[in-house]
Image (cartoon, rainbow, N blue to C red):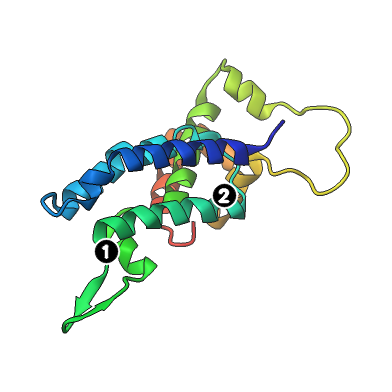
């Protein structure tokens, strides 16, 4: 079964457990926001994104990942005061305060990084699986999301049409990866 949402759900549950294990630290007024952000980046996000290189993210999965990340960022940064009045910080402000790519972009960047690595391997099982063409009949209905389609879509957003050729050149792939890091729409 090729249902990646099951993997995303499992990682969300594990990351939620990690978050609740650190909740006393996240609520503490003694610990600075920078330390709390560091706790999120080093202890919670790696649990959440474990295996994200192989995920095929649907829009619903992306939405759930963003909700989870905003829950944590809101816990860290909380509301803001303007002249003695409290207001809720917007999502953009939360991401600016965190000074890091949002979780979906982080997953897509790790997928692109891993793709370049797999393509450049000479005799690797991962590469053989990636480049193979499975036979058989397609089931009725809407086609399933494929990992390679996600890579093609991300590369197309960056203006790269033949990503397999670019990935074979390490320097060319690094250049494309740097563009992806700076690209706002990825």
The residue lying at 87 percent from left, 28 percent from top is 136
Question: Could you say where residue 90 lies in the image, as x and y percent from the top left?
Answer: 36, 71
Question: Residue 61 shows which numbered tag?
Answer: 2
Question: Could you say where residue 19 lies in the image, as x and y percent from the top left?
Answer: 34, 42
Judge left or right: residue 124 versus residue 23.
right
Judge left or right: residue 21 versus residue 123.
left
Give the number of the mark in front: 1 or 2: 1
Pick whichever, 101 or 14, lies toward us: 14
Residue bearing mark 1 = 78
Measured Cα–Cα span from mark 1 to mark 2: 25 Å
Pick whichever, 173 or 76, lies toward us: 76
The residue lying at 43 percent from left, 58 percent from top is 183
Pick whichever, 87 or 113, lies toward us: 87
The residue furthest left is 30
Question: Could you say where residue 141 lies in the image, as x and y percent from the top left?
Answer: 85, 47
Does label 1 or label 2 sit earlier along the sequence?
2
Mark 1 crowdedness (10 Å alpha carbons): few <14, some 14-19, many ≥20: few
Report the quarter where the N terminus lies: top right
Label 2 sits on a secondary structure element that is helix
What is the tally of numbered marks visible in this picture? 2
Question: Could you say where residue 115 lies in the image, as x and y percent from the top left?
Answer: 52, 34
């Amino acid at each position: 079964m090729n249902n990646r949402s099951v993997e995303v759900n499992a990682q969300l549950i594990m990351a939620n457990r990690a978050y609740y294990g650190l909740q006393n630290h996240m609520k503490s007024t003694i610990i600075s926001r920078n330390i709390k952000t560091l706790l999120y980046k080093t202890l919670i996000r790696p649990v959440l994104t474990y295996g994200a290189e192989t995920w095929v993210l649907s829009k619903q999965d992306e939405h759930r990942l963003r909700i989870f990340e905003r829950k944590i960022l809101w816990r860290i940064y909380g509301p803001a005061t303007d002249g003695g009045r409290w207001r809720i910080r917007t999502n953009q402000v939360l991401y600016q305060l965190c000074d890091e790519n949002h979780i979906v972009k982080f997953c897509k960047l790790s997928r692109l990084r891993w793709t370049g690595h797999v393509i450049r391997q000479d005799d690797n099982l991962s590469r053989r699986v990636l480049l193979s063409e499975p036979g058989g009949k397609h089931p009725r209905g809407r086609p399933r999301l494929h990992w390679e389609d996600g890579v093609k879509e991300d590369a197309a957003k960056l203006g790269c049409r033949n990503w397999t050729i670019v990935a074979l050149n390490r320097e060319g792939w690094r250049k494309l990866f740097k563009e992806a890091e700076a690209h706002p729409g990825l």
